[in-house]
Image (cartoon, rainbow, N blue to C red):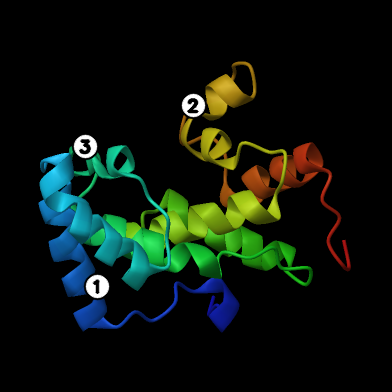
Amino acid sequence: MKLRPELLPPELDPQRVEHLTALVSSIDGGDRREVAPLLDEFNHLASTAFEFHQLQGILGSQDHDTWVRVVLASPAVQLLPDITEPELVELARRVMNAEGSEHAIQFWLELLERNLPGCKISDLIFWPDAYCSGGYANDDLTPEQIICLALDDSGRRLVGR
C-alpha cells in the first residue's frame, strides 16, 4: 500500500544529518566541559534542548546517524484526525516486518503510538503474549488483529469505523 506523505518520514538534508551526526559522535562519551559548545551547536541546529546527560550512551542503543534522523523526524509525528484503519494496518505491517530503515521504522512506531493513545502499541507488536496476558506467540497476531486490539484499547474512533 502506498502511504500518503503525512505517514512517511520527512526528507532530511543529508549534509545537515552528517553534520549533526558528527556533533553527536563527539558529544557522546565526551568531556562535559569540552563538548559544551558542540552541544549548544547541536541544539541550535536541530531545534532541540538536550542536556549533556541525554546524549550519553546513545551508541549503546543505536548508531548516531539513526539517532539524529529519529530526532529530526520526531516533529513530523502528528495525531492525524483522518487516519484510516487500512493506514494503521499498513504502518503496523511495516514495523512488524522491519520494512525500511531503522529510523523509518521508529517513525512509524511513534506515529502508531501518537494515533493510538493509551495503547502500548510497541508491547502489542513485539510482546503480544505479555500484552494480552498469555496465549499469543510473537507471530500469532496479524497486523489487522493488532490494530483492532489497539483501537479497542485506545478508545480511538476512526471516521468510517
Residue at the (55%, 77%) spot, across then down = 3
- Vertical side of 78 occupied by 139: above or below: above
Left or right, 61 with respect to 146, comes to: left
Specify which label sits upstream in the sequence, 3 or 2.
3
Residues marked 3 and 2 touching at CB (< 8 Å): no
Mark 2 burial class by Cα count in 10 Å: few <14, some 14-19, many 20+: few
Residue 58 in the image: state x and y as whole percent.
23, 43
Q: Can residue 95 be seen here?
A: yes
Q: Distance between the residues labelled 1 and 3?
A: 19 Å
**Pointer 1 residue:** 17
The circle drawn on residue 145 is none
Of all residues, the one furthest to the top in this rendering is 134
Q: Distance between the residues labelled 3 and 2?
A: 32 Å
> What amino acid type should be assigned to the residue bearing mark 3?
Gly
Specify which label sits upstream in the sequence, 2 or 1.
1
Secondary structure of the residue carrying tag 1 is: helix
**Pointer 3 residue:** 57
Residue 11 in the image: state x and y as whole percent.
38, 81
